[in-house]
Image (cartoon, helix red, strand yellow):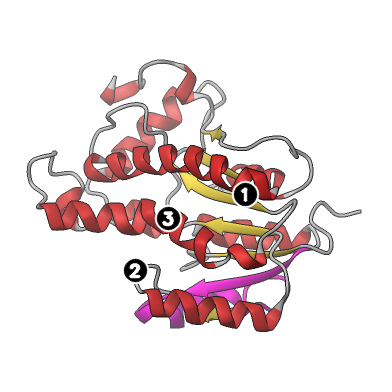
Amino acid sequence: MALLENKTILVTGILTDASLAFSVAREAQLEGATVIATGFGRGLSLTRRVLRKLPEPVELLELDVTDEASLTSCAAGVAELTDRLDGLVHAIGFAPAACLGEGMLAASAEEAATAFTISSYSLAALCRTFLSLLGQGSSVVGLDFDATKAWPLYDWMGVAKASLESLNRYLARDLGPAGIRVNLVAAGPIRTMAAKSIPGFSTFEDAWASGAPLGWDVNDSLPVAKAVLALLSELLPATTGEILHVDGGVHALGAMQGPYA
């Protein structure tokens, strides 16, 4: 029996075939899941095109996590497609340019708030919006980047991820009584469109590859996708509020190797 057979998974954040979310959707389909995807704004046409590369057809719904009307509309659209969500994947993150690579004093309060709202608060917004479709045995998985250290260049996005990690624990507390698990996968750097938007991030990626005990391939999203699938599946039924690191072991070292040591 396939890992996600007869399960319906909602995947957010697919923009290109380099997106971690795309890899999750592809592997979920290969493991028997029905995937529903969301896209946003001008990127919706990109998402629609890239979904054609998946093994099976996917329903695509528009979703702006900052707009309550859009959240409500998307929930109604999903409810027309299924009466239950077995899994929900949060792969959403954004920060204005001033929040990345400029240190902590460059961004305005409004810019920092934008990073928080889209990259962190949106996880709670998704859980609230789709709560009626989630239930006993459902699993919510968010994509994270280790926020226990002050990484070079990551700046306010690092603060947003720290908030996401705290929120993960609180959501696990609140949704656990309903039998809903909430976990994060803290991935090492992958060459996605989001990564390319961070000035100098390629140097950071190279340092990671040389510093990871297991090594790290910034072009290979499969290890991250497999970890997400494990959390979506029934393999870890008593695991919630957890942060699963899939980073080649860098988080365990205590310090980054290479140019940023």
Give the labeled residue for mark 3: 192
Q: Dot 2: what SS?
A: loop
> What's the amino acid at mark 3?
Thr
Q: Residue at image x 62%, y 42%?
A: 223
Residue mark closest to the camera, 1 vs 3:
1
Please provide the residue range marked out in magenta.
Answer: 33-59
Give the labeled residue for mark 1: 225
Q: Who comes first in sequence, dot 1 or dot 2?
A: 2
Give the labeled residue for mark 2: 66
- Mark 2–mark 3 distance (CA, rounded to whole Å): 22 Å
Quadrant, the C terminus: top left
- Residue 74: give x, y in percent of width and height: 52, 78
- Mark 2 neighbour density, 10 Å: few (under 14) some (14–19) many (20 or more): some
Q: Is residue 131 above or below residue 151?
A: below
- Residue 219: give x, y in percent of width and height: 50, 48
Q: Is residue 234 above or below residue 16?
A: above
- Left or right of residue 127, residue 156 in this image: left
- Left or right of residue 129, residue 200 in this image: left
- Mark 3 neighbour density, 10 Å: few (under 14) some (14–19) many (20 or more): some
> What's the amino acid at mark 2?
Thr
- Residue 83: give x, y in percent of width and height: 73, 74
Q: Dot 3: what SS?
A: loop
